[in-house]
Image: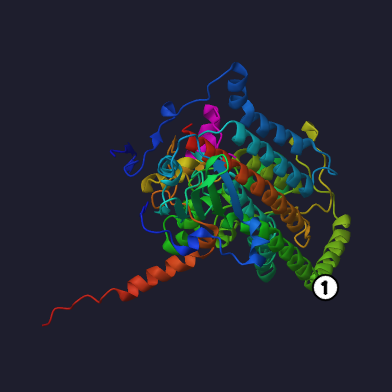
Amino acid sequence: MEGVLVGKRLIGTQAPVTVGWENIPRVEGGAFKRLFFSYFQPSVLFALILFWYYAPNSIAKASVAIGIGIGFRVFLMGLEFFFPRHESWQITWKEVTTDLFYVGLGYTVLRLVDGFIGSDVMVGAIQDSFHLKAFSWFMGLPILVQALIVSFIFDFGQYWMHRGMHNWYPLWLPHSVHHYITQLNINKGAVGNPIELFLIGLGIGGFFDFVPRAFLLAGAIGLAVGSYQHINVRFNSPRWWRFLFHTTEHHSLHHSQDFEASRSNFTNTYIFIDRMFGTCVDGEAELLGMEGGRRMGIAEQMTYPFTDAWRTIKGKLARPAQAVPAE
Amino acid sequence: MNATTASTLPRRAAHRGSPMNLRLIDWIWHIRGSVDLPAGQTSEDAFARLQSLLRQPGTSQHRAADALRFSKTDPAAQDKLAVFENGTLHVEQGGAGPVLRYHLISRALLLCFLAPLLFLAFAQLTIAVGQWQEPATKAAEKAKADKKKDAKKDQALTMNPIDKALGAPAPEKDGKKPDRKGDKYSPTSAYVFASLFAALYVIGRVLEAWLVKKRLRRTLAGD
């Protein structure tokens, strides 16, 4: 495969990828269908922002946010079922069950562990030890600005953590499991080794003080943008959306079987951070995964970081020492 | 990775020797059934037609005269038989003509059947940790209440003039960052997922049995 030169990098020499928005297919069909898949994403984003901005304090609670999040996911699962982007990513009983197992881990045992070793706990400990005061002046900023700062800080940290995972073997080990997914579906974001799910949740947002509503708004922005990362639905996302936000297209390229393509598009929400640091590639891929698209089972997903590390260490130790010429 | 051998079928493949007590419960992850062969179709023709289902990455198969055994390692997500790691197909003479009898084994169904137990265990673990942490939680709540008293003395949280002009509700005085994940010692989510997997098992057991029968029938008919 020849590949496409993007900046100094040759993308798509190992597996087929499509580079450039002009080469990406658009939703076809009746006027209503095209209208729906063109304006659904921005409509949901603005509706959620308005809701959380004006909701009375009695409604603006975490439990409501969790309820909205679950309802939105169920709706998107319905869209995936009836309007799949690729037949080769069609959801099956086994796929949905596997994905929900990881979602379940996130809502139960991982949440419990996070309460002891999560970044908020660490930030609290650091603040207590060093008698640090939170940056309280942030609370005087307009709520929407606060929300954008919260989500930007998180995504900026997420960008570097994720980029680190693709560039440093010890961090790659837990993240590699997530790259064995062979298709994108709405809950595939939860699939991965639990150690990675902990690492990816680390953030420094806890050092700053924001009003509670700003966190809810930031969460809503994350939901209305980040949910589409792993989804088997095609949208005619507006140009401004594709410029600012991480789309399914960007993320499919990140999961491509092509090594160079997978080293791009590291953000969760704001693709312009990737643009800032030269790691953004606008395009898409259908053939995803590692080792030519081998689907990894749950048992291997749980142990792979350890077994692969052991294999690597053993390989290095077994390598014969370089012969030193006799003098 | 397809390995077709015309050797005799391994003894284990027949799956007829399951102990009686296991047969009572193995329907949980075993699916058995039969499909009538189209008129005039021989076992050779039938197995040849089924190759479109069986020639998949990670699938190996062994053939005997009227029987075929397959096993799968890391089947692809879109493999039509991905749910079944092992299976035996054999052609028999039925009352109305030849039939294909199948016996398929699914580890995925078994794990889904057991998953509610895992999530119930997580619920118990959450409750236990919550009880263990109760004194610390109470102390934290007391500290928070004391802080709240102090906060009452302070002025109300300042609200940006832009938000005031746009009519956003004023923040509460004791506003703290909400726990986005809710109460971390509540077992509710574990119970919800236990129920979800129980429902998924029932759906999967019925759906996959129906789908495999439909796929075998269509493949044999050449649709």
Query: Is residue A148 covered in magenta?
Result: no
Q: In this rendering, is residue B48 above or below B222? A: below
- Kindly indicate the quadrant of the structure image that contains residue B193: bottom right
Residue plotted at (60% across, 39% down): A225
Residue plotted at (70% across, 36% down): A49
Residue plotted at (58% across, 39% down): A228
Q: Which residue is mark 1?
A: B135
Query: Is residue A238 covered in magenta?
Result: yes
Which percent across, then down, holds residue A216?
72, 45
Left or right: B217 as drawn, with respect to B109: left
Q: Is residue A146 visible?
A: no
In this view, which residue lies farthest toward the top?
A31
- Between A134 and A36, the residue placed more toward the observer is A36
Task: Check disc 1: other Cα within 10 Å, few if <14, some if 14-19, many if 20+.
Answer: few
Q: Amino acid at mark 1?
A: Pro
Q: In this rendering, is residue B137 above or below B39? A: below
Element at label 1: helix
Which percent across, then down, holds residue A211?
75, 48
Q: The disc numbered 1 marks a residue on which chain?
A: B
Across the whole image, how many numbered discs are drawn on residues? Answer: 1
- Kindly indicate the quadrant of the structure image that contains residue A199: bottom right
Left or right: A21 as drawn, with respect to A138: left
- Between B118 and B151, the residue placed more toward the observer is B118
Secondary structure mainly formed by the magenta segment = loop
Q: Is residue B90 visible?
A: yes
Which percent across, then down, holds residue B30?
60, 55
Q: Which residues are magenta?
A: A228-250
- Between B180 and A137, the residue placed more toward the observer is B180
Left or right: B94 as drawn, with respect to A307: right
Which percent across, then down, holds residue B77?
50, 46
